[in-house]
Image (cartoon, rainbow, N blue to C red):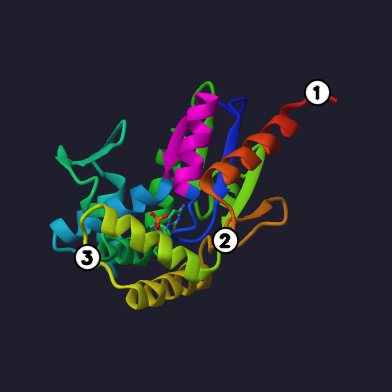
Amino acid sequence: MDRHVPVIAIDGPSASGKGTVAQKVAQHLHFHYLDSGALYRLVGEAARYAHVSTSDEPQVARLAETLNARFDNDNIYLNQKNVTDAIRSEAAGKAASEVAALPLVRQALLLRQRGFRTKPGLVADGRDMGSVVFPDAMLKIYLTADPAARAARRYKQLIGKGMSANMAALLQDIKARDDRDSGRAIAPLHKSSDAILLDTTNLSIDDAVEQVLARYAAATQVP
Ligand code: DC
């Protein structure tokens, strides 16, 4: 890991739009992009394939250590199988949040995540990018939106992909995931004191991207 490589950490709850914002910021700056949630989703999916329970910590951690994952542009592969859409299902999200609560799994994914920090820079999105994985990130953003707005976005996303969706169930799921992600003992989701709060309830994606880029420009300005 090169500590001189700048990192922009974008954390926040499920369906807050942080993935899209982070990707666009990375594109704009020609930085690399780390979707850390995808790693937890891949571990959940690997457990499902291997018929390992998401509560079997040692076995799930072993799967995380040996995870054969490949990120290729917009495609994600697990053991050479394209799982880009499969890991976005609600079931995969639930499994991801269960394996993400296991300390040995988080430990197993730590170095892999830090390995994404290469020149010219990295935009990393997740729950603990600014607090645990890249505590020295030069810019930390906590991106959120109210649960109803997030459920509506997830609904649109799933329908757009031809998947079935139910608003009430999605809202319930988002609230349950928030509780699980912020209530867990290790690396819980929370806004750290050095992160800038960005509420996107009434903001478009482009507005949010613009705000992050403006913060980045301000942070890199020589006084
Ligand atoms: O961002 P996402 O919805 O794809 O994340 C899937 C799950 O992984 C989510 O429930 C929380 C967990 N996660 C985490 O614990 N830490 C991260 N850095 C990223 C995701």
Q: Earlier in the sequence, mark 3 or mark 2?
A: 3
Mark whose residue sits in front, 3 or 1 = 3
- Horizontal and vertical percent position of residue 181: 47, 67
Q: Secondary structure under badge 3?
A: loop
Q: Earlier in the sequence, mark 3 or mark 1?
A: 3
Say left or right for 197 vs 188. right
Q: Earlier in the sequence, mark 1 or mark 2?
A: 2
Q: Which residue is mark 2?
A: 201
Let me know if residue 116 is in the magenta part.
no
**Residue drawn at x 39%, y 57% as measured from the top left:** 104
Q: Which residue is mark 1?
A: 222
Q: Quadrant of residue 211?
A: top right
- Horizontal and vertical percent position of residue 34: 43, 39
Contact check, label 3 and label 2, Cβ < 8 Å: no
User: Does the numbered disc 3 mark a residue whose Cβ is under 8 Å from ligand 1?
Assistant: no
Task: Provide the residue span drawn in magenta.
Answer: 19-35
Q: Is residue 94 visible?
A: yes
Disc 3/disc 1 C-alpha distance (Å): 50 Å
For disc 2, the neighbor class at 10 Å (few under 14, some 14 to 19, many from 20) is some
In the image, which disc is placed on residue 164? 3
**Residue drawn at x 63%, y 35% as measured from the top left:** 213
Q: Quadrant of the C terminus?
A: top right
Q: Secondary structure under badge 1?
A: loop
